[in-house]
Image (cartoon, rainbow, N blue to C red):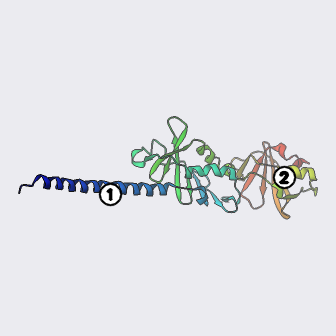
Amino acid sequence: MNLTHSQKRTSLTWALVVLFSGLLAIILFLQQQTKAENLVLIRTAESVSRITIERKDQQTIVLEKQDRWWVTSPVNLPANDQRIIPLLTVYTNPDPGYPINNVDLTATGLENPDITVTFNDYKVSIGDISVDESKRHALHGERIRFVPDWVYPFLQGGLSAVADLTVFGDNLNTIELPSGLTLDADAIASAKTLTAQQLVAWPRSEQPNILSELSVSVTLNNELTQWMMITTDRYVAMQPENSTHAYILPTEDAPWLSE
């Protein structure tokens, strides 16, 4: 059947309408999909209540948000909030990155990563440094992204990097030495300012030469506790009772131990 010119034009018009409608539907679908993906990528620091730091051949560290950030494993003590805040940017501000299928995991150090950080239940594995040595490869779900280079050595710092290293703080009331001597007000004021260089498992695998060990009575918030003060040839270790860890300080920071 031969179509008239008018019929051909009508058929062409309908074909174009159908084609345009199909293209419009595809565009709307892709826009909705992009919006959905963007919603998934919106992450806030406030939504994180637990951080787990796993390091190869090292203790796993768990941080939990309560009234503030706390280290809850392998010890229980306040965390350093000012150091946790930058760490949260690894979760909240990942760069776009690449699909995992486009990256050699072995070459990026992500096949068997040294460090994995889990924010709630979202894992980020830290790999090798980038070619320009300014950032690190990181595995976020199914994408390879980048994190700042400082993240790797920071996390390798373990408890010393994330814990509040204040030894006593303003909660200190008294310190009584084995001789029965109680420190005077000036010594207490000085002891309140003590900040450790490290927080380490104690006893250490490579034990230093111990010069003396004293059991000292410490009153914190009017509650009496016992601390071991271990003086070595290199530093002083201050260990609260029933703790598996000790604060490490320079010997000169606690001169009252030799009095």
- Quarter holding residue 14: bottom left
Q: Residue most toward the top?
A: 132
Q: Which residue is mark 1?
A: 25
- Asked whether the viewer can see residue 101, the reply is yes
Q: Would you call the spot at circle 1 few (<14 residues within 10 Å), some (14-19), or many (20 or more)?
A: few
Pick out the residue farthest to the bottom: 223
Closer to us: 31 or 156: 31
Q: In the rendered structure, which disc, 1 or 2, sits on the residue that comes first in sequence?
A: 1
Residue at mark 1 to residue at mark 2: CA–CA distance: 68 Å
Residue, x 61% and y 50% (percent of image)? 87
Disc 1 marks a residue whose amino acid type is Ala
Q: Residue at x 42, y 43 (%)?
A: 104
Using the image as rendered, state which of residue 124 and residue 238 is in the foreground.
Answer: 124
Residue 128 % position (x, y): 52, 42
Locate the N terminus by quadrant.
bottom left
Q: Quadrant of residue 78?
A: bottom right
- Name the one closer to the observer, 166 or 28: 28
Q: Which mark is residue 192?
A: 2
Residue 254 x/y as whole percent? 85, 47
Above or below, comparing residue 104 to residue 244 in the picture:
above
Q: Is the residue marked by circle 2 packed among few (<14), some (14-19), or many (20+) residues within 10 Å? A: some
Residue at image position (89%, 53%) is 188
Residue at disc 2, secondary structure: helix
* Dot 2 amino acid type: Lys
Q: Residue furthest left?
A: 1
